[in-house]
Image (cartoon, rainbow, N blue to C red):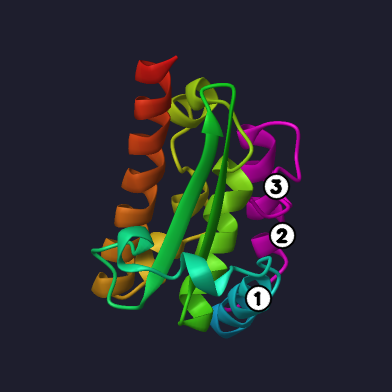
Amino acid sequence: MTEAPFPLEPTAADAQAAIAEEFGFFSDWAERYQYLIDLGRKLPPFPEAWKTEANRLHGCQSLVWIVAEGDAHRIDFHAISDSSIVSGLIYLVLRVYSGRSAHEILATQPEFISAIGLAKHLSPTRSNGLAALLAFIRERAQTALQQA
């Protein structure tokens, strides 16, 4: 288990509001993409031993590995990508969902994606990868609730 830097905000809703506010400071998408890349660099180290086929997220064009730890009360997600922009997207998703209860995860729609205009500015392959990441997180939360 690695140290979990998330959650940064007390609730997933607060995290989404903070993300929308931060992205509101940028006037164009070149700046927003640079900010995404900078956020991706803030992801905690991901152990090489976790970079296995079993931990690989399929549905992404980039290589993405993700590990979930915890139970219905708190699920921590650890993830990394070989792509700078995808790592930034991972950072945003983990900021909203990691370290939260399964109930909060399932009750939280990823509204930050449309709030910051991300949906309109991602390539189809990145959009598919983001959808796969969100689906993985929801599935883990569902599984945790079923095991509780």
**Residue 34, percent across and down?**
62, 82
Q: Residue at x 56, y 79 (%)?
A: 33
Determine whether 6 is above or below 109 in the image: below
Stretch in magenta: 1-28
Q: Is residue 16 magenta?
A: yes
The residues tagged by marks 1 and 3 sit, at their Cα atoms, a distance apart of 18 Å
Q: Nearer the viewer, mark 3 or mark 2?
A: 3
What is the number of the mark on residue 6? Answer: 3
Q: Which residue is mark 1?
A: 35
Image quarter of the C terminus: top left
Question: The residue under label 3 is which amino acid type?
Answer: Phe
Residue at the location (33% across, 71% down)? 126
Asked if residue 136 lies in the magenta stretch, the reply is no
Tell me: residue 127, above or below residue 142: below
Distance from Cα at disc 1 to Cα at disc 2 = 9 Å
Callout 1–callout 2 Cβ contact below 8 Å: yes
Q: Is residue 56 left or right of residue 45?
A: left
Which element carries disc 2, helix, strand or loop?
helix
Residue drawn 44% across the image and 52% down it? 114
Tag nearer the camera, 1 or 3: 3
Identify residue type, mark 1: Tyr
Give the residue drawn at x 73%, y 53%: 3
Q: Quadrant of residue 63?
A: bottom left
Crowd tier of the residue under label 3, counting other residues whose Cα lies within 10 Å: few below 14, some 14–19, many 20 or above: some
CA distance separating discs 3 and 2: 17 Å
Which is nearer the N-term, disc 1 or disc 2? 2
Could you say which disc has been placed on residue 22 in the image?
Answer: 2
At label 2, counting other C-alpha atoms closer than 10 Å, the crowd grade (few under 14, some 14-19, many 20 or more) is few
Q: Out of 49 and 130, give the one closest to the viewer.
A: 49
